[in-house]
């Protein structure tokens, strides 16, 4: 095991001491190492967004923390208990990016089965069905559902029974914008009292709900810390538009984009309104300096 001390956040945990701790973890599949020497400790109730390109090891990390994969080296502990012990696994809920509900089960029967396993009640089932808006799906077979509907049912399964630690692997993938927003709101509610690891390819999501970012690069930690520390000192946007020359305060350009420095993202709607009032035809507005994008490269 590596003797490298783990990265750590918020040692004084206000949520009763719930903690995820990895020390020198290397893990993968069929002898191939995907993760190398991963060490960190998290204790503060918050959303920790796990970012990285495909193949960086996000799902491998989640499966290792959940105890589905045994690490080749190192240790994983939940609240000080080794993940190989049943006691540790019962303290967390894991949502896989792959729907794990059998196709041959009706939605209602699947939720009843998992409720029995989790110790949830009939009232818990009805509450989660209502919260996720899947009343119309309860009599349908899982195999008949669309990808978005399957995701909603899988999320319902995860929230049948409350836990203090949640591992959510791309929970909003294949969801329509309205439901994706509702899921993010649900996660933000959880993060007031619980630890939430949340993987996503969506940088908008990361900025909206994440307090901390754990970025993986080629199976190693590239960055682990507060999202606020990644914010650029200046907020610069690029405006691609017709008739903007002489209207914008700045004359600087980068390619087809006029560069404009603002106090922050909250100033963007005001700028759009001003440009439109002056007859500028806006084609595109985007952030020109986004440190989160650098974590993918």
Image: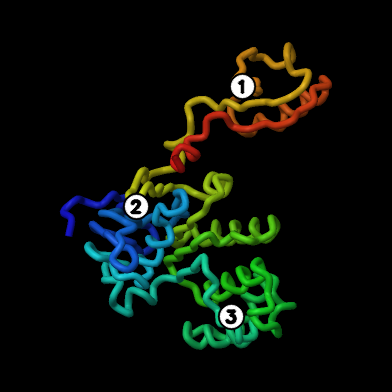
Residue 81 visible within the image = yes
Please rate how many residues cluster around mark 1, counting C-alpha atoms within 10 Å: few if below 14, some from 14 to 19, many from 20: few
Please rate how many residues cluster around mark 2, counting C-alpha atoms within 10 Å: few if below 14, some from 14 to 19, many from 20: many
**Image height check: is 239 above or below 32?**
above
Pointers 1 and 3 in contact (CB under 8 A)?
A: no
Please rate how many residues cluster around mark 3, counting C-alpha atoms within 10 Å: few if below 14, some from 14 to 19, many from 20: some
| Disc 2 element | loop
Quadrant into which the C terminus falls:
top left
Of callouts 1 and 3, the N-terminal one: 3
Question: What residue appears at the point 29 percent right and 75 percent down from the top-left corner?
Answer: 84
Q: Disc 1 and disc 2: Cα gap in Å?
A: 34 Å
Looking at the image, is mark 1 or mark 3 nearer the viewer?
A: 1
Q: Which residue is mark 3?
A: 124
**Image height check: is 55 above or below 89?**
above
Question: What residue appears at the point 68 percent right and 75 percent down from the top-left corner?
Answer: 145
Q: Residue 141: x percent and y percent? A: 66, 83
């Amino acid at each position: 095991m590596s003797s490298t001390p783990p990265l750590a956040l918020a040692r004084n945990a206000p949520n009763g001491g719930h903690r995820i701790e990895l020390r020198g973890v290397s893990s993968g599949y069929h002898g191939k190492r995907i993760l190398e020497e991963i060490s960190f400790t998290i204790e503060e109730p918050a959303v920790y967004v796990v970012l990285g390109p495909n193949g960086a090891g996000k799902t491998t990390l989640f499966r290792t923390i959940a105890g589905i994969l045994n690490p080749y080296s190192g240790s994983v502990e939940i609240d000080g208990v080794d993940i190989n012990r049943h006691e540790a696994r019962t303290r967390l809920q894991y949502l896989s990016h792959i729907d794990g509900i059998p196709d041959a089960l009706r939605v209602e029967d699947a939720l009843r089965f998992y409720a029995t396993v989790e110790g949830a009640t009939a009232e818990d089932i009805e509450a989660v069905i209502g919260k996720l808006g899947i009343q119309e799906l309860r009599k349908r077979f899982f195999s008949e559902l669309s990808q978005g509907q399957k995701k909603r049912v899988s999320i319902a399964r995860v929230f049948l029974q409350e836990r203090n630690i949640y591992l959510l692997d791309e929970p909003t993938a294949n969801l329509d914008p309205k439901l994706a927003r509702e899921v993010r709101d649900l996660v933000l509610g959880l993060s007031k009292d619980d630890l939430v690891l949340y993987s996503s390819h969506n940088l908008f999501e990361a900025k909206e709900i994440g307090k901390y970012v754990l970025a993986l690069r080629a199976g190693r930690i590239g960055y682990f810390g507060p999202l606020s520390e990644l914010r650029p000192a200046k907020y610069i946007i690029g405006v691609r538009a017709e008739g903007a020359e002489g209207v914008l305060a700045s004359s600087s350009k980068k390619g087809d984009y006029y560069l404009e420095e603002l106090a922050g993202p909250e100033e963007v709607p005001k700028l759009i309104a001003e440009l439109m009032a002056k007859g500028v035809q806006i084609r595109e507005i985007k952030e020109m300096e986004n440190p989160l994008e650098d974590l993918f490269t």
